[in-house]
Image (tube, grey):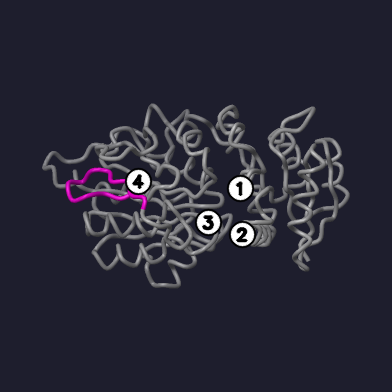
Amino acid sequence: MVEVLIVDDLKSAREMIRDILVSDPHIHICGMADNGNEAVEMVKRLQPHLIILDSHLKQTSGYEVAEEIMQVRPTPIIMVTTASDALVDTPERMFGCGVLDVIEKRDLYRWRTRPDVAAGFIRKIKLLSKVNRTSIKKHCEKTETRPKTADPINRGSLNINASGKDENRIIAIVSSTGGPNALFKVLRELPSGFPAPILIVQHMSPGFIHGLAEWLNHEDHIRVRVAENKGTLLPGEALLAPDNAHLTVDENHRIKLVDTPPVGGHRPSGNTLLKSIGECYGRQALGIILTGMGHDGAEGMASLKTAGGKTIAQDQNTSVIFGMPKSAINLGAVDLVLPLSQIASAIIRFAKTGL
């Protein structure tokens, strides 16, 4: 039985979420709170398996409540927010407080006419409730917004030989639940002068991708922005797939955004990105799957590997959710399985030598 705590200052919102969850016999609502102090006390007393937390409560921010919960008893948290919140919340608050996933409240209000919304919400709750406290602690560890000193993998400038043979290499990263923090930790380790572009598909609710790009942006190392159609691929720049569009590369090695149907329920799809770079770059492409639920990216990794590219998956111990990496590994589509702390080093090796 999954024990769930609901925290929202609106009675109608608490009841709406309750009505969705009581339809599943394997979920029990252990409590409902309308303010942050009550929520923290309930976490201590009831020890829920998962918390559904509103981003804006009357007397405090949901993000502040999440940070306090992570101090007293790390617990999986799904943040419920609105599109307008995405415009005013700082990226550090959205992605730096240990929250595992963010969903839009407006979508939940449609659950009576959209049974797929309710089913997806319940499925997500069941999966995230299984994340152990050790993984939660690692996920919510504070990270420096800028590296201060060099470390063992050498963050100095990366000088590639002048022959030009490395100029066409490309890296693609696919991530979902737990991905924002994982991406932050990988990208901050890449050096200035990094010689290849990086394309990223991160599954998240609409409206948050520009905030994620701002948070990930390392001005002294890797520049991060949201991809634009027909944009140029530049070394040392990471491009995030925008909301509701597949990120691909055309035959001229330029960005091509397409609005074809979702693949495996996802648009943008990691499979679509990985297949595209395999077709255009072959052995000069590196595909990486980080933490995330589901199976997106597995088939794309297999396609990339068949095309001669290299593939890496994050290991189970450092993944918040091992679903996506595990699917790719089980498919035989992964060359290397690495802890998160070693993935940046592997990317640098690929840029230098092709692994």
User: Residue 265: x, y in percent?
Assistant: 48, 60
| Residue at x-position 36% and y-position 62% | 300
Count neighbours of disc 3 (C-alpha within 10 A) and say few if under 14, some if 14 to 19, many if 20 or more. many
Whether label 1 touches label 2, CB < 8 Å:
no
Give the number of the disc on residue 86: none
- Say how many tags the image has: 4
User: Label 3 is placed on what type of residue?
Assistant: Gly
* Above or below, 350 relative to 157: below
Q: Secondary structure at mark 1?
A: strand
Cα distance in 3D space between marks 4 and 2: 27 Å
Reading the image, the residue beneath label 2 is 120
Which residue does the numbered mark 3 point to in the structure image? Answer: 292
The magenta span reads 247-259
Q: Amino acid at mark 1?
A: Asp
Q: Which residue is mark 4?
A: 199
Q: Compared with residue 243, is residue 49 higher up or lower down, i.e. above or below?
A: below
Nearer-N-terminus badge (3/4): 4
> What residue sits right under mark 1 in the picture?
101
The crowd level at tag 4 (other Cα within 10 Å; few <14, some 14-19, many 20+) is: many
Amino acid type shown at disc 2? Gly
Separation of residues labelled 1 and 2 (CA atoms): 13 Å
